[in-house]
Each structure stands twice: as C-alpha cells, then as structure tokens.
Image: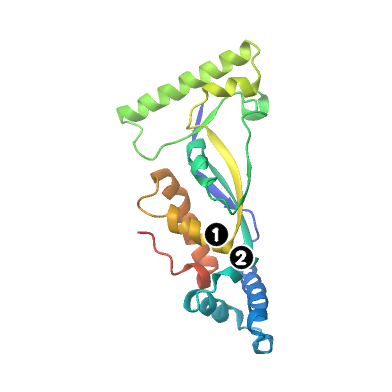
Amino acid sequence: MKIIEPSFEILTPFQRADALEMLRHIERCARTCYKSEGKTTPDSAPAFVRKIAHTLKHESVIEHCSVSVLFICDRGVTHEIVRHRLAAYSQESTRYCNYGKEQFGREITVIRPPFWSECDDRFKFWQAVCEQAEIAYFGMLDYEATAQQARSVLPNSLKTEIVMTCNLREWRHVFRLRTSSKAHPQMQQLMRPLLLRFQEVMPELFDDMVPV
C-alpha cells in the first residue's frame, strides 16, 4: 500500500499572461452591457474587471472564463467537491480501475490524513485499517470478483483524481466556502494553496478573498 500527500494541478494555461487574456475577454464581454467598447485600451482590462466585479458587483460577466483543476485527494473530499453544481467533473473510476493491475503497481494508494503524525497511535490504527482493506480488496479479486464488485471494501482514504472545471465566479464561491476554517481540514489543505495560486496569477478577481 502506498501513502501519498494530496495535491492539485491547474490544467488550464494559467500564467500571468494567460490571466491577462482572460481579463481582456471578460472586459470585451462586459463592455457590451454598457456599449463602452470605445474605452478599451491595451491595458484597461485589469482595472476595469476589478471595478466591475468588486465595486459594481457585476459578477455575472466573470462567468465567461473557466479554469480546470486536477485534484489528487481522498474520495471523502471528492464527495464534498461534487456538491458544487455549476461545474463539470471527470473522476477516476473504481468501477473500471483495477488496482491489481500492473499500471497501479498492484497496490492501492491512500491519502495521508493531516490530523496525526506517523508516531501517533491513531495514525497507526488508520494505516492498519487501510492495509486490511487492501488485503480484502485483492482477496475479492483473487476470488474473481470484478473491480466494480471489489471496490465495496475500499476505504474512504483511497486516493482518487478528479478534474473540476468551473467559471471564475463559481471558483470565487468555492473558495469562499472551502477555505473557511469551518471547512473540512482536508478540504482546506487543498483549497487554501489553490486560492493563493489564483491570487498570485489573477489578483484582480481573487485578492479580496481572505479565509476566515
């Protein structure tokens, strides 16, 4: 059994130059509302978008751009992620992925919980339970159960990969909920660093967001 840390990867091109192109696209779309296209300049997008989103609260226009993020986390976290309706998802399937195959190293992979150190008895108990689940899973495969049948014994800590695509307005909503101190610790572990990345690349739309 392999134990790994959770992580994320932004799949959409998302450097500062890419963000500026998104801001220009949002500006073009938004200026349609006011017929102010003539006020567009090569450098007008950042200030315009900041004003329209934060001062005028005209957030619908930022729905014109979307970002895709790949999360590697446990399945419990994904059960919460997919509660966000205004998004598209593609997730690693335990119906079709047979972890007894060579491509998976013939082992299951689980996500390390952030709650305990490795010397904590609770961590050792968690690890033992996951190892027993792995034994049960491969035992079912040995008895010719299919992957979709054997998955019933896999733990919630099982590593999964999920791609989430949503527009920038929805990302603001996601960050507002999922970086809060009231969010699950494993959710915060993913979303707070991701928010920092969004703030670094596109401060015009995300630098007002402070986890509480």
The location of residue 185, given as percent across then percent down, is 39, 45
N-terminal of the pair, mark 2 or mark 1, is 2
Picture residue at 53% right of the left edge, 59% below the top: 171
| Side of 119 where 73 appears, left or right | right
Q: Label 2 belongs to which residue?
A: 63
Q: In this orientation, which residue lies closer to the viewer: 13 or 178?
A: 178
Q: CA distance from mark 2 to mark 1?
A: 8 Å
Q: In this orientation, which residue lies closer to the viewer: 5 or 45?
A: 45
Density class for disc 1 (Cα within 10 Å; few <14, some 14-19, many ≥20) is many
Density class for disc 2 (Cα within 10 Å; few <14, some 14-19, many ≥20) is some
User: Which amino acid, by three-letter code, is at mark 1?
Assistant: Glu
Q: Secondary structure at mark 2?
A: helix
Q: Quadrant of residue 100?
A: top right
The location of residue 72, given as percent across then percent down, is 55, 42
Query: Tag on residue 170?
Result: 1
- Residue 140 seen in render: yes
Mark 2 vs 1: CB contact within 8 A:
yes
